[in-house]
Amino acid sequence: MGDDKMGGKPVVWVNAFQVKPGKLDEFMRIQSEELRSFAEQDTVNGALGSRLLRASHRDRAIAIALFESVEAHQSWLKQADFSAHYDKIKDLIEGAEGDYYTVEAAYGATIE
C-alpha cells in the first residue's frame, strides 16, 4: 500500500498477535525488550512512537507503531534485521496480522 492511499498522513502500523496459551508473559517480556532496544537506538528515521498493548482476558497482544509515512516504515523494515527477534517469538505465537491505518478522528489524551 503506497503513501498515496494514505493521503500523505502519518501512518499507524498495527500488528495483532495471537499468543499461545500460557505464553503471554514471556511474549510481552520479549516484545518489551525489543521495543526498548529500538527506542534506545534512536536510528529509525520517520518513527514517531510506539505502544505495546496486552489483552486483559485473552492471549492476545497488539503492537502499534506510528511513522511519518508508509515509506518511512518500509525503509525501517529494510534496514532492520527481524530474523533474530522472530526466532525469539515464533514458538510463542499462533499467528500475527498487520496493516497500515490512518487516524481519522481522535479525542482526549494519549495513554502511557
Image (spheres, rainbow, N blue to C red):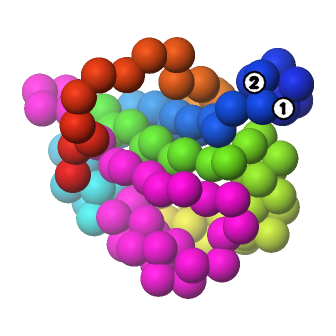
Q: Is residue 77 something that shows in the picture?
A: no
Quarter of the figure that contains the N terminus: top right
Q: Nearer the viewer, residue 93 or 112?
A: 112
| x 60%, y 31%: residue | 98
Residues in magenta?
31-58
What is the crowding at mark 2: few (fewer than 14 residues within 10 Å), some, or many (at least 20)? some
State left or right for residue 95 relative to residue 11.
left
The residue type indicated by label 2 comes to: Met
Kindly identify which residue carries mark 1: 3
| x 74%, y 61%: residue | 76
Q: Tag 1, which secondary structure?
A: helix
The residue type indicated by label 1 comes to: Asp
State left or right for residue 32 relative to residue 43.
left
Quick check: 110 above or below 101? below
Residue 66: x and y in percent read 55, 46
Kindly identify which residue carries mark 2: 6
Q: Quadrant of residue 12?
A: top right
Magenta run includes residue 32: yes
Quick check: 2 above or below 70? above
Magenta run includes residue 22: no
Q: Quadrant of residue 77?
A: bottom right
Q: Tag 2, which secondary structure?
A: helix
Outermost residue toward the bottom in this view: 41
Residue 78: x and y in percent read 83, 61
Q: Nearer the viewer, residue 34 or 59?
A: 34
| x 47%, y 82%: residue | 40
Answer yes or no: do the residues labelled 1 and 2 have beta carbons within 8 Å?
yes
Q: Quadrant of residue 17?
A: top left
Quick check: 77 above or below 81? above
